Image (spheres, rainbow, N blue to C red):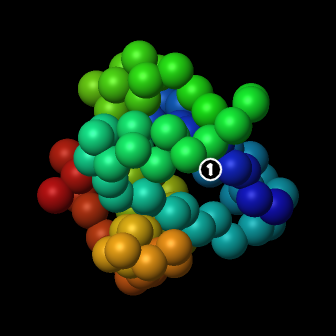
Amino acid sequence: MVVDNTNPTVEERRSLVELGHELGARVAGYYFEAEARECIERNRGRRGKARVPNVAIYATAKKLVPPSRSEGFDELFRVRVAGDEDGFRIGSFSCDAEGR
């Protein structure tokens, strides 16, 4: 199962992580690391329901807490935009409870 959504806080992710473990799944998290200005730039190219108001991007960035293994994730991956390309670079990482 994949949850394609922004869950910027530990509290918002907790029920999803718990449900995954209750169902016997291995829980992996993908942290898309990007500055708000980068997100706004990508958002400009979206149309219709895919485009979100800039204020939503800023509000989410303000409350974002990077995920950590202490939340119950079995694996965590950091995802970054691959330079000028349309793809992404993915690597594993671990953060403590403060996202360091």
Quadrant (top left/top right/bottom left/bottom right) for the N terminus: bottom right
Choose between 87 and 5: the one closer to the eye: 87
Percent x, y of residue 38: 33, 48
Where is residue 47 drawn, in percent x and y?
69, 37
Percent x, y of residue 10: 43, 37
Report the side of 55 relative to 12 (left or right).
Answer: left
**Which residue occupies the extreme left position in the image?**
100
Which type of secondary structure does the marked residue at label 1 adopt?
helix
- Tell me the residue at 36%/74% (across/down): 84
Identify the residue shown where x is 37% and y is 69%. 80
Tell me if residue 10 comes above or below residue 75 in the rendering: above
For badge 1, the amino acid type reads Val
Which residue does the image show at 44% across and 59% down from the upper left? Answer: 31
Q: Quadrant of the C terminus?
A: bottom left
> In this figure, which residue is indicated by the disc labeled 1?
17
Specify whether 86 is left or right of 68.
Answer: right
Kindly tell me whether residue 13 is visible in this rendering. no
Residue occupying image coordinates x 30% and y 39%: 36
Task: Give 84 or 68, whichever is nearer the viewer.
Answer: 84
Q: Which residue occupies the foreground of this view, 76 or 58?
A: 58
Asked if 47 appears above or below 81 in the picture, the reply is above
Coordinates of residue 71 in the picture (x, y in percent): 44, 51
